[in-house]
């Protein structure tokens, strides 16, 4: 049976001379090649590999005058590349920016803007309905049908908010692929 060799995807990240020196030092300390260290750090950030060399300590972001003059390369399998690419996309970062941040010890956070904005909108609606109920508690007369509607809407908003929060928490704790 002949095995076909799968071609690995490659990705290049430009690093400054100082950053390359830090990567080389970290790889040497971990006893691995630069390429292996880079691969492990990128996959660690995407939670694809569980045991990895120690990360670099975070450095301040580069100044606008700093140019990325040095390049570090590593090879990834299709699955590894897809995992990193998906995580970068969920963080709303370009792949090169995501890789650079991960390699320098930052932990880019995934964004879920639709769920977050829905939670904010629901909370805003709950606050406004709650203010109407407080007016009624302070003696402002509201017709009984309006009070029933406000109370029903408030209960529906609370249920929707709780469902959105639960869905957001489930998405945050969803298991990541393993190697």
Image (cartoon, rainbow, N blue to C red):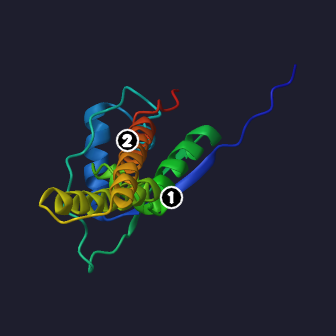
**Residue reaching furthest to the right:** 1
Q: Residue at x 38, y 38 (%)?
A: 169
Position of residue 2 measured from the top left corner of the image (x, y, whole percent): 86, 24
Of mark 1 and mark 2, the one earlier in the sequence is 1
Image quadrant for the N terminus? Answer: top right
- Judged left or right of residue 10, residue 32 is left
Using the numbered discs, state the Cα–Cα distance from disc 1 to disc 2 in whole angstroms. 43 Å
- Give the residue displayed 40% in from the left and 39% down from the top: 172
In the image, which disc is placed on residue 12? 1
Which mark's residue is nearer the viewer, 1 or 2? 2
Give the vertical position of 92 relative to 85 (above or below): below
Q: Residue at x 54, y 49 (%)?
A: 86
> Can you tell which quarter of the image residue 136 is in?
bottom left
Looking at the image, is 153 positioned above or below residue 40? below
Q: Which residue is mark 2?
A: 162
**Which residue occupies the foreground of this view, 57 or 159?**
159
**Horizontal and vertical percent position of residue 138:** 11, 60
* Residue drawn 63% across the image and 48% down it: 9
Q: Quick one: SS at disc 1?
A: strand
Vertical position of residue 71 compared to residue 154: above or below: below
Expressed as whole percent of the image width and height from the top left, the position of residue 11 reads 54, 54
Which residue in the rendered view is the most extreme toward the top? Answer: 1
State the residue in front, 107 or 52: 107
* Total numbered badges shown on the rendered structure: 2
**Looking at the rendered structure, which numbered label has been put on residue 67?**
none
Q: Secondary structure at mark 2?
A: helix
Q: Is residue 130 left or right of residue 112?
A: left
- Quadrant housing residue 76: top right
Closer to us: 150 or 72 = 150
Left or right: 21 as drawn, with respect to 100: left
Dot 2 surroundings within 10 Å: few (below 14), some, or many (20 or more)?
some
């Amino acid at each position: 049976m002949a095995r076909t060799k799968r071609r690995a995807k490659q990705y290049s990240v430009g690093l400054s001379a100082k950053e390359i020196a830090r990567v080389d030092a970290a790889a040497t300390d971990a006893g691995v090649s630069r390429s292996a260290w880079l691969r492990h750090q990128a996959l660690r950030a995407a939670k694809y590999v569980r045991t990895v060399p120690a990360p670099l300590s975070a450095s301040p972001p580069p100044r606008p005058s700093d140019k990325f003059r040095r390049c570090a390369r590593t090879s990834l399998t299709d699955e590894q590349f897809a995992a990193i690419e998906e995580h970068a996309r969920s963080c709303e970062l370009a792949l090169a920016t995501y890789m650079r941040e991960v390699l320098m010890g930052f932990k880019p956070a995934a964004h879920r803007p639709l769920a977050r904005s829905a939670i904010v909108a629901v909370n805003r609606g709950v606050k406004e309905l709650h203010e109407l109920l407080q007016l009624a508690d302070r003696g402002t007369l509201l017709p009984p049908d309006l009070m029933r509607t406000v109370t029903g809407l408030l209960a529906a908003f609370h249920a929707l908010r709780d469902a959105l929060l639960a869905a957001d928490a489930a998405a945050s704790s969803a298991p990541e692929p393993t190697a």
